[in-house]
Image (cartoon, helix red, strand yellow):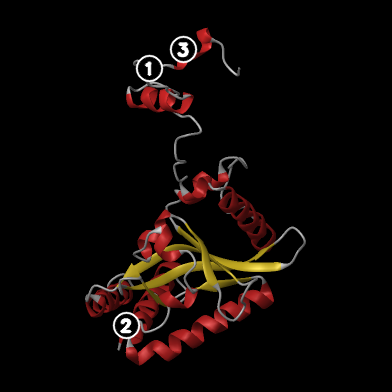
């Protein structure tokens, strides 16, 4: 005999029936018995981590900031500990965005953008990452689309050859079509620890959205320059006047891009 009478009694239900261990387990589950899921147990589905907490992103951030320091000659953030870098970069008040050129140099794809950059380009992390970086360049407006593409290729090539490139009066567009002009940015190469070129990033410190008031801004700055000359008596070579003239020329250049 496989079971004696006492063992059979434990398995038997009502007279004339024989319950298996599987039946008993199923019954216990229906009554709420069995092993219960505890808070934070391995049975819970994992929660997606914020982008800057993902291991892949952390490693990428470290290569970005180390490459910046080598190429620019100073850290991208002052007094930042290495364990703080990824969070500080994610929350920086300026935009930081990068694309990968290791897999497909002719069609680089975005592989990082901090919160400021995502806001700038009207996108979420999932919407932007993995997209060709050209998606925020083309068709800013029909008249200047070809020029924007040519400018982009020139900047990327200059950065690749020289390690860095300053960016001024550079028009892009958000994923929802909003034009934005990067008026102060810096491109740099991202290198692996081996020294191999794997990508490029840009820190965007100043930008402007087109809101239809560009002509007015040019007029106001021209009036300011005229006042400095005629009323204040400043002449060329004075730092205040030179700065005002430089600003006027920049505003005129921005206006021309839209016409």
* Mark with earlier residue (2, 1): 1
Which residue carries the number 2 mark?
A: 255
- The local secondary structure at tag 1 comes to loop
What is the crowding at mark 2: few (fewer than 14 residues within 10 Å), some, or many (at least 20)?
some
Which residue carries the number 3 mark?
A: 10
Q: Is residue 258 left or right of residue 8?
A: left
Question: How far is disc 2 from disc 1 in space, using C-alphas?
Answer: 88 Å
Residue 232 image offset from top left, x and y in percent: 31, 69
Residue 121 image offset from top left, x and y in percent: 37, 66
Residue 210 image offset from top left, x and y in percent: 28, 74
Callouts 1 and 3 close, C-beta under 8 Å: no
Callouts 3 and 2 close, C-beta under 8 Å: no
**Quarter-of-image position of residue 27:** top left
Residue 120 image offset from top left, x and y in percent: 37, 63
- The local secondary structure at tag 3 comes to helix
Any mark on residue 214, and which? none
> In this picture, is 217 found above or below 82?
below
Which residue carries the number 1 mark?
A: 13
Dividing the image into 4 quarters, which one contains the N terminus?
top right
């Amino acid at each position: 005999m496989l079971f004696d009478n006492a063992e059979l009694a434990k398995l038997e239900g009502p007279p004339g029936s024989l319950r298996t261990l599987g039946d008993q387990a199923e019954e216990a589950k229906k009554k709420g018995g069995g092993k219960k899921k505890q808070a934070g147990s391995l049975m819970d589905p994992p929660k997606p981590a914020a982008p800057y907490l993902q291991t892949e992103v952390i490693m990428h951030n470290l290569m970005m900031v180390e490459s910046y320091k080598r190429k620019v000659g100073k850290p991208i953030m002052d007094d930042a500990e290495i364990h703080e870098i990824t969070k500080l970069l994610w929350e920086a008040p300026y935009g930081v965005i990068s694309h990968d050129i290791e897999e497909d140099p002719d069609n680089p794809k975005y592989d990082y953008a901090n919160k400021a950059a995502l806001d700038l380009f009207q996108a979420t992390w999932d919407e932007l990452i993995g997209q060709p970086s050209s998606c925020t360049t083309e068709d800013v407006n029909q008249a200047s689309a070809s020029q924007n593409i040519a400018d982009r290729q020139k900047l990327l090539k200059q950065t690749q050859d020289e390690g860095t490139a300053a960016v001024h009066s550079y028009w892009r567009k958000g994923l929802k079509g909003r034009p934005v002009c990067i008026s102060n940015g810096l491109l740099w190469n991202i290198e692996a620890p081996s020294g191999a070129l794997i990508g490029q990033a840009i820190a965007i410190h100043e930008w402007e959205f087109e809101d239809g008031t560009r002509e007015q801004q040019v007029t106001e700055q021209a009036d300011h320059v005229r006042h400095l000359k005629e009323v204040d008596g400043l002449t060329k070579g004075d730092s205040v006047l030179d700065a005002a003239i430089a600003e006027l020329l920049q505003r005129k250049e921005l206006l021309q891009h839209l016409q």
